[in-house]
Image (cartoon, rainbow, N blue to C red):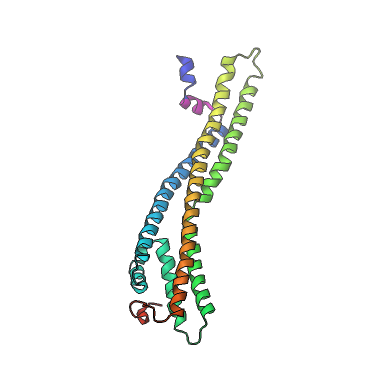
Amino acid sequence: MNVTEDMSLLSLISNASVLVQLVMALLLGMSLVSWWFIFRKTFVIRDALRRADEFERSFWSGADLGTLYQAAVSSRNDAGSLERIFESGFREFVKLRKQPGISLPVLMDGTRRAMRATYQRELDYLESHLSYLATVGSVSPYIGLFGTVWGIMNAFRGLANVGQATLAQVAPGIAEALVATAMGLFAAIPAVVAFNHYVRHIERLSTRYDSFMEEFSNILQRQVNFPSTPQGPDMEQEEH
């Protein structure tokens, strides 16, 4: 019974050396923060996918561009990434088109640059905190291994003055040290899995945003080439 109590997880942690306990506390803190980012990023990615689907349905349903723009401006705080890209590109297109004598290449280049800047900001937001998950996934096993090596060194130093070492004397010290490695893996594995999962979804969103920018640019260019194409409400009311 005493052996069972001494080999319990809480007992192993409490009996570990101060440095090993600090390593365990560091790994526990890293794991808790990474789990917070994992849950938070789950909702961010899910919301981005939902908003992209909703806006693409509205955009390709044949809705007027001016109406879509006014809706994006009025709900700017609740707009999704794709909607913000559309808003910035359409605003720049209208502003540049009012300039007399502007050429088509300059007009479209300015529109694409405006959308590209918004695209980069939205992508940076989606990728926020991913670097922390990557760091936890790559560093945690080594931190845990450091705690394990240090704990094993202490265990063998404690046996230096013992005339005859037995398994019962060696096992607790080694078990205490191995807890650090287990905690390092516990922190690293979820972080690596989540990082790869979110990177895959962000790459898919990035491809959708990039494809939309190209298709939207083609639509705007056709409007310039064919001025008779319906353009919706009076663009003079657009905000600058």
Front residue of 106/77: it is 106
Q: Is residue 113 left or right of residue 43?
A: right
Which residue is painted at 42% across and 74% down in the image? 91
Furthest residue toward top: 164
Front residue of 117 and 107: 107
Q: Quadrant of residue 88?
A: bottom left
Q: Position of residue 176 (x, y in %)?
A: 54, 26
- Quarter containing the C terminus: bottom left
The answer, for residue 121, to whether it is visible in the render is: no
Q: Is residue 21 above or below residue 34?
A: above
Magenta stretch encompasses residue 198: no
Please give the count of numbered marks on the rendered protein: 0
In the figure, is residue 150 to the left or right of 197?
A: right
Image quadrant containing the N terminus: top left
Residue at image position (48%, 68%) is 115
Question: Which range of residues does the magenta coloring cover?
Answer: 9-17
Predominant SS along the magenta part:
helix
Q: Which residue: 37% across, 72% down?
A: 65
Residue 139: give x, y in percent of width and height.
58, 42
Give percent across and percent down for residue 130: 51, 50
Picture layout, residue 44 above or below residue 78: above
Q: Evaluate whether residue 51 shows in this view.
A: yes
Q: Is residue 11 magenta?
A: yes
Horizontal side of residue 105 vs 220, given as left or right = right
